[in-house]
Amino acid sequence: MTREIEKAAGIPVVQIATIVPIMLTVGANRIVPGVAIPHPVGAPDLGADGDRATRRELVLRAFRAMQTEISEQTVFER
Amino acid sequence: MKRIVHYINQFYAGIGGEEKADRTPFFEDKVIGPGMGLAKEFGDRAQIVRTVVCGDSYYGEHTEEARRQCLEMIREAKPDLLVAGPAFNAGRYGFACGDIAAAASENGIPSVTAMYRENPGVELFSKKTYIVPCGDSARTMAQALSGMARLGAKLLSGEALRPAREEGYIHRGIRKNFLHEKRGAERAVEMLLKKLRGEEFRTEYEMPVFNKIPPAPPLKDLAHATIALVSSGGVVPFGNPDHIRVSSAETYGTYDISGLSDLTPENYESVHGGYDRTWANLDPDVVIPIDVLRELEREGVFGKLHPFLYTTTGTGTAVAFAEKFGREIGEELKKAGVDAAILTST
C-alpha cells in the first residue's frame, strides 16, 4: 500500500510499523520502526505522558524521514 | 475421440498483421496455422474440430463482446478442451489467449495456453487457466506446442494433476493438502541443514515477490505542507460503518477527520483481527496518531492535516488488494494536493 501510494501520488510516504523486514520486503522507502505491533505509535506502559511523548517523537521522526533525500530504502532510527 | 477447439489471432490465421488486428471473431471447422503442429502433437488422442480466430486489437478493445462471441463459437463445437495460442511475448495476444481460456474454464471447458513468463497475461490469468511457459518468440513454437499438448492430454484424461513444476505449467497459487511421509519439523530441519551447507533447497511456502520503486523526492517545506494519514491498523469509526473486514480486507474506508483532535474509545475503535486490540481500543491514537498531529499542527510545525483518513485492516489482505488500495489512495492524495503521508501498520 505504502509503495503504491508513493508511486501514484509522487510524494514521500513514511511507514511506521514494528516489523522492519516486512516493510523492507513490501517496498516501503522511508521506514520508522514502531514501538510494538498492537501499538506502533504508542507506549501505554509508560503512562499517559510517556505514551504521548513517545508518539510525538515518532511523528517528528516521520517528519524528518519525509524531508530527507534518500536513494534507497532507509530505516530512520531514533 | 476427444474434441479440441483451438484459439489463435489474425496473424497466425494468416490473415494479416497489425492492419488486420481489428478483425472480428470468426471460426473455421478445420486446422489452421500452428494448429497443424498441435494436431500432430495430439496424434490420435484428440482432434482439432474448430479454429476460432480473433484480431488482437479487437479482443483488447472490445473484450466483453469478443469474449462473448468467441465463447459462443467455442461452445457450439462441444469441445473437451480449449487450446489458445501460443502467445509468446505478444501482450495483446497473451491477454486474449488468457482471457478466452479463463472464460472457457469458467464455463466448464478445460483450457490450456502457452506464453512467455513475462507476458502480462501470465500475471492476469495464471490462476484461472493452465499456462505453459515458453520462449518469447515463435522460435520456440515446437516447445510451446508440445508443452500444451502434453498438459492438454493430461487434462483430457481426467487424471489428477501433480504439482505445477512437475506438470510443466505456471503455478496457480493453489496449495493442496496431502499426507507427507515425513513430519513438518523433520522437513524444516532438513531444509535448514541444506541451507547451512549452501545446498539447493526448495521452500514449501513461497513468498510473493514485491516490486520496489525509487524513493519519491523529499518534502521541501514542512511548515506549509499538507500531510495525510493512512493506516492498515484496522482503526475505524466506532461501529465500523462500512463493514471493513476484520481480516482479508477487500475495501478501505475514507473518513472525515477535520473536526477530530483526539481519537477516543467513544469515536473510534480497532476491528483488526490480527493483533491484541486492548491498547488500540483504550486509545486509538496508539495506532493512528491524530492527537499529536493536531498538536504539531497548532504549533505550526507542519502546515495542515489532510481532512480525510484512509484506513483498512492489513491482515491476510491479498497483495493485489493492498496495491489497489494504494493506487486509489495515491490518486486521491495527488488530486487533493497532499505533500506527504504517514502510514501506520500494526
Image (tube, coloured by chain):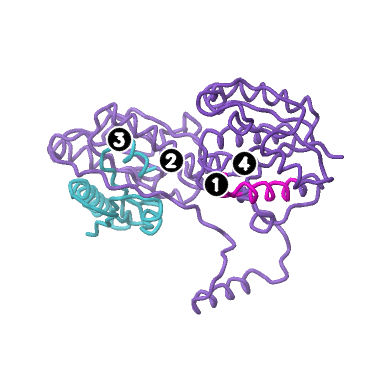
Chain colours: A cyan, B purple
Q: Are marks 3 and 2 in contact (CB under 8 Å)?
A: no
Closest to the observer, B157 or B293 = B157
Q: Is residue A4 above or below residue A31?
A: above
**Are dots 1 and 3 on a single chain?**
no
Which amino acid type is marked by label 1? Answer: Tyr
Chain letter belonging to callout 2? B
Q: Which residue is mark 2?
A: B323
Magenta stretch encompasses residue B121: no
Give the chain of mark 4: B
**In the figure, A21 relative to B262: above or below?**
below
- Say whether residue B60 is left or right of residue B259: right
Q: Is residue B175 left or right of residue B246?
A: right
Same chain assignment for discs 4 and 3: no
Q: Are marks 4 and 1 in contact (CB under 8 Å)?
A: no
Residue that badge 4 annotates: B86
Circle 3 marks a residue in which chain?
A
According to the picture, the residue beneath numbered tag 1 turns out to be: B116
- Disc 2, SS: helix
